[in-house]
Image (cartoon, rainbow, N blue to C red):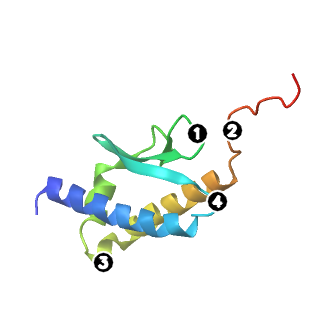
Amino acid sequence: MIEAQRIAAGKRWIGEVFERLRRVYLGTVPIETWDWQDEDPEYRIRVQLAGHAAPAYIPSYGLGFGRGQLVACGHPDPGNDPARHDVEATLRGRLAALAVAPRAPGPPKPNAHP
């Protein structure tokens, strides 16, 4: 399997884990959409939260998953389990942080009295 295929396999694996964890945080992290932000050699998941104009990133912006992490996650060798555990912990930690982050205020409500 060539590196590009392993990166694609790693992104699929991470996406599946992200979807599973996303369901856990469904009530506290209102993710409307998500996609991959590919800036080789860094890859991040970009999420759009309900009520937020700016996207959030997993991992944080500028601290993406590296090519090696994706390759390891995309290869089922048990020797890659530590990398998969680290990636899952990163996803879980970032979702937990988003769950307690202050929510952006909604649109202003019109005054009832002029």
Considering depth in this image, is 25 or 74 the residue closer to the camera? Answer: 25
Name the residue carrying label 3.
78
Lower sequence index among marks 2 and 3: 3
| Residue occupying the point 62% across, 59% down | 96
Q: Residues within 10 Å of mark 1 (few under 14, many from 20)?
A: some
Where's the N terminus, which quadrant? bottom left
Residue 81 located left or right of residue 20: left
Lower sequence index among marks 2 and 4: 4
Percent x, y for residue 73? 31, 65
Secondary structure type for disc 3 = helix
Lower sequence index among marks 1 and 4: 4
Name the residue carrying label 1.
52
Instruction: Name the mark nearer the viewer: 2 or 1.
Output: 2
| Residue occupying the point 58% across, 64% down | 25
Considering depth in this image, is 11 or 41 the residue closer to the camera? Answer: 11
Name the residue carrying label 4.
28
Instruction: Name the mark nearer the viewer: 3 or 4.
Output: 4
> In the image, is residue 32 above or below residue 22?
above
**Mark pair 3, 1: CA separation:** 39 Å
Percent x, y for residue 55? 50, 39
Name the residue carrying label 2.
106
Q: Callout 1, which amino acid?
A: His
**Mark pair 2, 3: CA separation:** 46 Å
Q: Callout 4, which amino acid?
A: Thr
